[in-house]
Amino acid sequence: MSEATQTLWLIPTLPLLAAGALALKPRDNRGAAKALSIGSMALALLLSVRALLESLNLQGDHGVAREFFNFVWLSFGAGEAGVLKLGFVLDPLTAVMLVMVTFVGLLIFIFSVGYMERDANFKQFFCFLSLFAAAMLGLIVSNSLLLLFICWELVGVASYLLIGFWFHKPEAAAAAKKAFITTRIGDMGFLLGMVWLYAETGTLLFYDGGAGCLEQGAIAALVAKSAAGGIAVSTCIALLIFCGAAGKSGQLPLHVWLPDAMEGPTPVSALIHAATMVAAGVFLVARMFPVFAAVPPGAEGGAAALTIVTWVGATTAVFAALIAVAQNDIKRILAYSTVSQLGYMMLGIGVGGVAVGMFHLIMHAFFKALLFLGAGSVIHGCHEEQDIRRMGGIKDHMPWTFYTYAIGMLCLTGLPFLVGFVSKDEILVSALHGNTGSLVSLLPFLMGLFGAVLTSFYMFRQVFYAFFGTYRGEASQAPHESPKIMIVPLVALAAALVFFSLPKVDPWGWFSGFLEGGHQHEIPTGHIALVIFLSVVAFLVGASLAYRLYFKRGIGSADAPDALEERFPEAFATLAGRFHVDELYEASVIRANAWLARMADLLDRKVWNGITQFVTQVAVMFAWFARLFDEYVINQGFDFGCRRVNDGGRVATKPQSGAIQSYLRVIGISLAVGVLLLTWGCSGS
Amino acid sequence: MTLETWLVFSAALFCVGLCGALIRRNAIIVLLSIELMLNAANLNFIIFWRYGVNADAASGVMMVIFSIGIAAAEAAVGLALVIAVYRHFKTVNLDRIDSMKG
């Protein structure tokens, strides 16, 4: 085992220690907050890079290089079956995620120093950030589904704390609660899946030298068995675990928390929406991919679980992109864009495997972090204004922010031959390649393509609104460029993206080779050319539409209706209202829940309470009889006896008067009587 | 003088002592009366010895000498008690000394 694997546990431990230490520091200790959290993150980055290099070294000719070490966590019985093991694993998936999370995380930490400068709870913020990073890194390195789940929940807690960081705002408190509860619904499925998996395979370790739950033996056992309805157990477990992933990654039915999470400070949005929390769901699917992809021998078609992942991903991608078109809050647009891109990742994993989805995840992490931090810089520069209608013309005031933002935006929209284009393209190619000829199987591809048009449109719309034209806020408060400490992370992220986009670098070739251990998908060149052409068209259509609607015409005033709104007021209202999913949940799930709670209350109050009251009354009655018996039989008898004894004592003390001569008198009389008796007795005999 | 005469005399002496002990209230007089009763008993020893079967042996006298010794010691203790009682109660009237009761 290499040293990098042995020290893998240090990577999450460092930020965790930083968080613990910060929790104990006094509130105004800003220096310690900066030094500890950024220092621990930088060290974690170094260790991660070492792990990546080690992983590259290990890469042999025979498949994927993987090292792990497991340890016994607790034992509850005899033998191998009676111990629960946890462990850490170093494989390409872990390595690339580690480097991405620590790198992006470090930049976000640095950015936060500037963004949160005037906040009173500065130290606390960094404490939470560190905790979040620790949980996320632990999730990545764990070699056990249980350890992953523990870290998964820790991520949830940390995100709750961070989203609700400005808890004095009611919206923030509500958003934090919503995020926590919504993801908990998904986690319920995750937990069930985990328990089922343990029941079937007897282990939660991913890799254990052939005995892990992701290895050949366990998978074969899982597909061989079938649950109700003839579905393979592996498919059921995969779908249950996917519930958890969908909750964390904001997939369709459970996406509602993600846009609301924007109430947190912007670095938190970047951390949650770019690098970590939402990536956790996709990462989980990638980690559990062998279970998802398991097919019963002799079954027709692909794996059922992956098909569902594909469809959920594709639907989410289009759905969220549509909503993003009609939003006005700069961060909300990005939030829906994130939901949409997460859908792409799921789609990618569903149709193309781990490498395709993960590549988009990593690249998306870079450009979405850049966009969020850029948005944070804009908000900071515009005096906490988040409405793009009240911005405009910021380009000239904040050049650094604008150019870096533009790079991120172009990556997201897929300007040809930037890295975002490449990653999205791979997904579309895989989707096209995966179709079986029927229209239904082609649909995910078409949805992905349509999503690309929308992505291009809403991002250009946002940029035209915010950065071009004239400033529509209050004239006296012109926007200002952000401090250097906020600009540096932006530039670093933008530079990384440009580096990845250089033709010579070819990140995709390297990445897929690394992650899949040399297996290359054979995709016909005709498909690739077709998809590239269609992608370029999608980009151009979206961009030119936005250009015509928002740039050429110009935007009059902040209160003027949107160009789309003028044309399709009803459709626009639906989109702006986010398809009324929140209202739907409010009317269905939440109301049903409230009704159930009321019924439970009634049941408690009337039925259970009545029974309890009756039992109580019976008991009281018995107690009352017992008391009567006690008082009138036992007590009275006892008292009577006592009184008699007392009286007797009093009589008996009478002769002892203390007068010495009375005693003498008794002696004298007895003597006389004795003498008389003796005398008469003697004379009588 | 016959045995009966002496015995009646000693019984009379005992009765005088008993009456004194019962009737008088002064502790010292009571003590004196007790000594009288004791002497009546001593007298009985002497009488039964004198008129007994072995009048030559000194057994009766020896008994009386012991008894008188013990009586002297008892008188010393008794007087000391009386003095202690007097110091405590400021009286030797036995009717007033009755705190030793149940």
Image (spheres, rainbow, N blue to C red):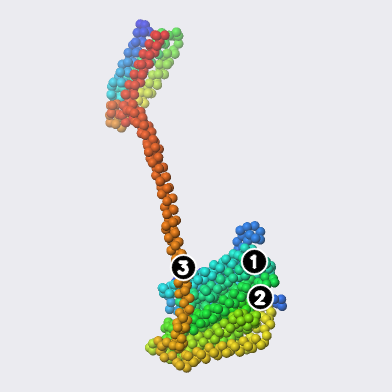
Element carrying mark 3: helix
Decide if residue A358 is on the left or right side of residue B82: right
Q: In the orientation shown, which residue stands out farthest toward the front?
A: A438
Q: Position of residue A667 (x, y in %)?
A: 35, 21
The answer for how far apart the CA atoms under marks 1 and 3 are is: 34 Å
Q: Which residue is mark 1?
A: A226
Q: Which residue is mark 2?
A: A301
* Image location (x, y in percent) of residue A360: 59, 81
Question: Residue A485 in the image: x percent, y percent?
Answer: 49, 83
Dots 2 and 3 on the same chain: yes
Chain letter of disc 1 in the image: A
Which residue, as the protein is rendered here, is positioned at the far right?
A61
Give the residue displayed 67% in from the left and 67% down from the top.
A224
**Residue A83: assigned label:** none
Q: Identify the amino acid type marked 1.
A: Ser
Q: Is residue A521 above or below residue B33?
A: below
Label 3: which residue? A592
